[in-house]
Amino acid sequence: MISINHYLVLSLALFTIGVIGVVTRRNVIIILMSIELILNAVNINLVAFSRLYGSVNGQIFSIFIITDAAAEAAVGLGIIIAFFRNRETVLGDEMDLLKG
Amino acid sequence: MADTILFYFFGGLAVLSAILVVTRRNAVHSAVFLVTALLATAGLFLQLRAEFLFIVQVILYVGGIMVLFIFVIMLVNLDVAMRQAQFNRAWYVWGLLAVAMGAQVYVVFHYARMQTSASFFNQAVAPVEQLEPNTQLVGQALFSTYMLPFEIASILLLVAMIGAVVMAKKRV
């Protein structure tokens, strides 16, 4: 029998993998992909609790999170293109234009 | 029984492809494994009988956001970045910190399971009849209780669209 604890642990595993990707990778495109993984892990939790309590609210919230993910991906990839045009790099630790 | 098998299949697939997303050198490979991870999550949504979210996940994430990622990977020249180091200098420190964070949350789950009455965390996530015409219920909630957040989300998307266009333009 699959309990709510199974979904919590699976979602925690996906979240942790996403955080590891964000803090260790240098390529900004892969950092954005890891952020998508994190948002996805949150969605699993929300849908599991929505099913547990028999209420549709969790699924609505998860739709809003998907909307946010789309907006964030569009703006983030726009920033990457603008940055690549200026500096010819996509590596996160070379982004130091504000360092003066 | 079928629920258990589907959960472990899709969950294992999601975790495996997530690990491959953060470890591959080639960004295109990462994108392909991200598609697998997102599709496995969509399978989990279907296993939870959230049909509307399943199709939203497939169309919006796999069909929309991933196409955006592939386009940017094609526009940006990744050959130089691919030949350089893929991880930060002190990546093991940051990775260890992230794993410590995950372990911390897991310990909290564990103790919460010990402290609270054992039934809560072992409640079965079984299909209930209350959520049955799923798409209909989601639509009714979106257009009654969540009318204002829905409209605000549309404004957010408009602003993000304009922002992305302005940001990626040649001369501002």
Image (tube, coloured by chain):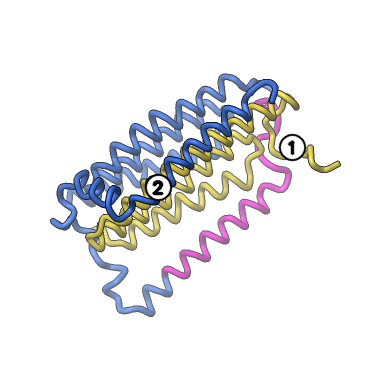
Chain colours: A yellow, B blue
**Residue depicted at x 69% and y 38%:** A92
Task: Name the residue type under label 1.
Answer: Met
Q: Quadrant of residue B52?
A: top left
Residue marked by disc 2: A64
- The answer to whether tags 1 and 2 share a subunit is yes
**Residue depicted at x 58% and y 40%:** A31
Q: Secondary structure at mark 2?
A: helix
Q: Quadrant of residue A32?
A: top right
> In this orientation, which residue lies closer to the viewer: B145 or A91?
B145
Q: Report whether residue B92 is seen.
A: yes
Q: Is residue B170 above or below residue A78?
A: above
Residue marked by disc 1: A95
Residue A65 magenta-drawn?
no
Q: Residues within 10 Å of mark 1 (few under 14, many from 20)?
A: few
Residue B103 magenta-drawn?
yes
Q: Main secondary structure of the magenta part?
A: helix
Q: Position of residue B168 (x, y in %)?
A: 62, 26
**Residue depicted at x 68% and y 53%:** B93
In screen coordinates, is B149 left or right of B166? left
Q: Report whether residue B15 is seen.
A: no
In this picture, which residue range is highlighted in magenta?
B81-109
- Which of the chains bears the disc numbered 1? A
Q: Position of residue B87 (x, y in %)?
A: 66, 40
Q: Position of residue A99 (x, y in %)?
A: 82, 43
